[in-house]
Image (cartoon, grey):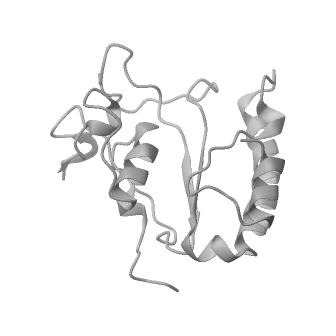
Amino acid sequence: MESNTFLTSLRLATAALATAMLAPACANSPRTPIQHVIIVVGDMDTLIKRMQASKPWDSTAIFITFDEGGGYYDSGYIQPIDFFGDGARVPLIVVSRFAKKGYVDHTYSDHASLLKFIEENWSLRSVSKRSRDNLSNPQIDSGNSYLPLNRPATGDLMSLFAFTDKN
């Protein structure tokens, strides 16, 4: 969804429970990854401020992430999940009144983790028996928090939140 369409749906109180957006300045752009980050920060600042001023803010989580094709370098462990493999690790930022403040999570996650979060939060079944959102949550080795003991596995992002703390 384009950000203008989302802002209109937010103003009209018709926004969906889950919405995916692409920063308009990044679509089909030849810019470098750092230029994308700078542009997205400006776009997201506007969207976040509008969201925070809206009625749905009390029950909202905004996930900011990037496609793995953006030129990021990653020397960390990448699981051989399926035929296509998993991509390089990319940043994920959560903005919500329920997000743990200053928290950095080392649980192995990928883009399917966003879907796993939606499924867990709304008690939904996985998309299919073969999809990545069907993978179990990682069991963490205390010696290496990046390497799940039960590979392949991907997190559901629930550890990023403190839903009982409303401050």
At 80% from the left and 57% from the top, the residue drawn is 7
Q: Is residue 13 left or right of residue 137?
A: right
From the top left corner, tell me how far across and down residue 41 is, in percent: 76, 51
Numbered-mark total: 0
At 27% from the left and 37% from the top, the residue drawn is 134
Q: Give the quarter of the image for residue 109.
A: top left
Q: In this view, does 117 lie to the left or right of 137?
A: right
> Does residue 107 sit above or below 9 in this rendering?
above
60 or 31: nearer the eye?
60
From the top left corner, tell me how far across and down residue 45 is, in percent: 78, 59
Instruction: Assign the N terminus to one quadrant of the image.
Output: top right
> Does residue 68 sit above or below 125 in this rendering?
above
Residue extending farthest bottom: 167
From the top left corner, tell me how far across and down residue 101 is, in percent: 51, 72
> Does residue 104 sit above or below 151 in this rendering?
below
Q: In this view, does 72 lie to the left or right of 139?
A: right
Q: In this view, does 139 lie to the left or right of 111?
A: left
At 76% from the left and 75% from the top, the residue drawn is 53
Residue extending farthest top: 83
Q: Give the quarter of the image for residue 85.
A: top left
